[in-house]
Image (cartoon, rainbow, N blue to C red):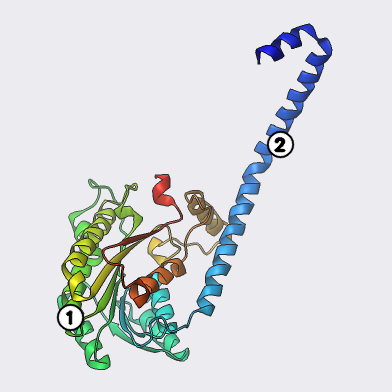
Amino acid sequence: MDWLRYHLRKNRLLQVLYLKFTSIINSINYLIRRVRPSALLASKQMKRKQHAATMIGLAKQSGKGRLSGKVAIVTGAASGIGRTTALLFAREGAKVIVADINEVDGVEVEKQIKNSGGEATFIHTDVTKESDVQILISTTVNNYGKLDILVNNAGILLEGSVTSTTQGDWQKVLDINLSSVYLCCRLAIPEMLKHGSGAIVNTSSVQGLTGFYNSAGYAASKGGILALTRQTAREYAGLGIRINSICPGIIYTPIFGINTERPADREALFESWSNQMPVGFFGLPEDIAFATIYLASDESSFVTGANLVIDGGLSIRGV
């Protein structure tokens, strides 16, 4: 730079050329700043569409019998991640017990599986009640003779900081998100022990790994799932039962409770989510369901006590 400054002072032509060059560069930078936001938005929209097309394609290609002969319970299976997991489990050959408190949508999932040639049973279940969970387990074993897979997916999201969350809301989130995992595991594991094998997949969240704004109860419940998963995996690893967890990031599901019927609102929401993702797009229920199939199948027979983070890089980016 000292050499350049010296010659600029000595050479008038060089000064003129330098000024023109910097002017061109500044103009290019200005245009980039004007164009870049819209170009980035278009790029993220394209990534979302490509990702959705990929997931749809993979779902259509599923059905290779990866869970053939398995009997699986999926809680929270009436909608969102649970629904997609139940549908894909059935396509992979599992006999699926659709467990949910939402009877209308749960029965619809059962019908969809049966109409596609699969086998499924809906069982109305409040996962916070031991009596309901006991009926869920016993009915499954009575109907199908065994229980191979348990997916603890039921959950709710209630927003609030530590100081703004009421004790009632705190307890409700812990009961549905965390205590239900304990109840289902406590009653399902003895049945799995009877035939010496089983796979349990617990749905946690990246909020169990890192802090988010205004989600005290939810984060506590999801962090508890991670600890409970490690603990139970350690206790039953030598008895043929594998227990793992999954931490989804931002997944487009009804749990967010946001009305996105208006296209403008929906696109604004999608853009907001995508901006948080290092990969440039948010996740879909299929992203989690495919991972759950892996952890539930014999393909992961050497995997237990593990936590699979599926968040588009959100947890490594920081929040």
- Proximity of marks 1 and 2: CB atoms separated by less than 8 Å: no
Q: Does residue 179 appear in the picture of this structure?
A: no
- Total labels: the figure holds 2
Which disc is residue 31 wearing? 2
Mark 2 neighbour density, 10 Å: few (under 14) some (14–19) many (20 or more): few
Dot placed on the residue nearer the N-terminal end, 1 or 2 = 2
x and y percentages locating residue 190 in the rendered image: 15, 80
Return the residue nearer the eye: 269 or 280: 280
- In the image, taking residue 236 as reference, residue 204 lies left or right, namely right
Q: Does residue 9 appear in the picture of this structure?
A: yes
Q: Residue at x 25, y 78 (%)?
A: 198
Q: Hey, what amino acid is under mark 2?
A: Leu
Return the residue nearer the eye: 305 or 317: 305
Q: Quick check: 3 above or below 155?
A: above
x and y percentages locating residue 255 in the rendered image: 38, 64
Q: Hey, what amino acid is under mark 1?
A: Leu
- In the image, taking residue 158 as reference, residue 281 lies left or right, namely right
Q: Secondary structure at mark 1?
A: helix
Which disc is residue 193 wearing? 1
Q: Quadrant of residue 122?
A: bottom left
Return the residue nearer the eye: 48 or 268: 48
x and y percentages locating residue 185 in the rendered image: 20, 73
x and y percentages locating residue 206 in the rendered image: 35, 55
- In the image, taking residue 154 as reference, residue 63 lies left or right, namely right
Mark 1 neighbour density, 10 Å: few (under 14) some (14–19) many (20 or more): some
Q: Secondary structure at mark 2?
A: helix
Residue that extends furthest to the right in the rendered view of this protein: 13
Q: Quick check: 77 above or below 253?
A: below
Q: Residue at x 52, y 56 (%)?
A: 281
